[in-house]
Amino acid sequence: MSEILEAIDERGVATITLNRPERHNAFDDAVIAALTGALRRLAADAAVRIVVLASSGRSFSAGADLEWMRRMATYSHEANLADANALAALMQTLDSLPKPTMALVQGAAFGGGVGLVASCDIVLASERAVFCLSEVKLGLTPATISPYVVRAMSARHARRYFQTAEIFGPAEAHAMGLVHEVVPAEALAETAERIIDALLQGAPGAQAEAKALVTLCEETPIGGALMAETARRIATQRTTAEGREGVGAFLAKRKPNWQVKS
């Protein structure tokens, strides 16, 4: 049985499904490598418009597989560093993917599973979902996922939950900013389709640039340098094929050529 399932529909919506339900979709080095490879392939595929991250079974992801962690505890510092860098690369690959990404959290997301959630652009959670940054209970820290989790839930909330390892529900996750919408379990797929339909109206190149723009604004102080860079970016986008097509289609009252025909 494959531990990572991939599917791409006729609209260019790719779904990656974590498929280790018997282990609550926990990941080890092999799963990390497979997931990173899948994301990189999808990033390079011009036919892919959106990437959805889902899971089979009751849990979204329990984070690191305990057998893998037990094995890594016996390895050298150098081997552990290489292993940690692989997980860091997975999170960075997902976070910086030049396409819209969406996580569908149907159940428990613990540890690194929260990192996957925080690295996605859009997060929908079932009312049955629960979250936990559980690392300190194991004598560890949420180190490689921390840049994404702190950004998503704010440093103030991270100070609490990184240290207490409390379990919190979808309403709390929504209030913190980790989750965008909380819906009944039976409405998760329908809600995802509504957002996918909205995403498919946008130009793929412009969406990639818009995503990069958010990162730029997060990391750059407001001032002359940021003003100059944002001006350069919109000036460049206006002269792209997408920019010309989008404005031309609007003025001609027709659909632009990137929209999926209904």
Image (cartoon, rainbow, N blue to C red):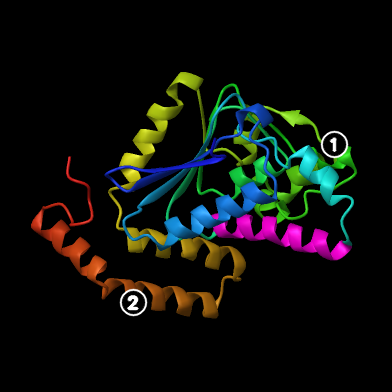
Q: Which residue is mark 2?
A: 236
Residue 69 in the magenta stretch? The answer is: no
The structure residue drawn at horizontal position 54% and vertical position 63%, both measured from the top left corner, is 215
Give the residue type that dot 1 points to: Thr
The structure residue drawn at horizontal position 66% and vertical position 41%, both measured from the top left corner, is 114
Q: Secondary structure at mark 2?
A: helix
The C terminus sits in image quarter:
top left
Name the one closer to the observer, 64 or 182. Answer: 64
* Magenta highlight range: 77-95
* Residue 157 falls left or right of residue 60: right
Give the Cα distance between marks 2 and 1: 47 Å
Give the quarter of the image for residue 9: top left
Looking at the picture, how far across and down is residue 5, in whole percent?
48, 40
Prevalent SS, magenta region: helix
The N terminus sits in image quarter:
top right
* Residue 219 falls left or right of residue 156: left
Looking at the picture, how far across and down is residue 169, in whole percent?
67, 27
* Residue 10 falls left or right of residue 123: left
Crowding at dot 1, Cα within 10 Å, few <14 / some 14-19 / many 20+, comes out as some
Q: Is residue 6 above or below residue 132?
A: below
Instruction: Say the numbered circle drawn on residue 23.
Output: none
Q: Secondary structure at mark 1?
A: helix
Looking at the image, can residue 184 be seen? Answer: no
Give the residue type that dot 2 points to: Thr
Residue 84 in the magenta stretch? The answer is: yes
Crowding at dot 2, Cα within 10 Å, few <14 / some 14-19 / many 20+, comes out as few
Name the one closer to the observer, 126 or 8. Answer: 8
The structure residue drawn at horizontal position 72% and vertical position 62%, both measured from the top left corner, is 85
Name the one closer to the observer, 153 or 6. Answer: 6
- Toward the left, the furthest residue is 252
Q: Which residue is mark 1?
A: 164
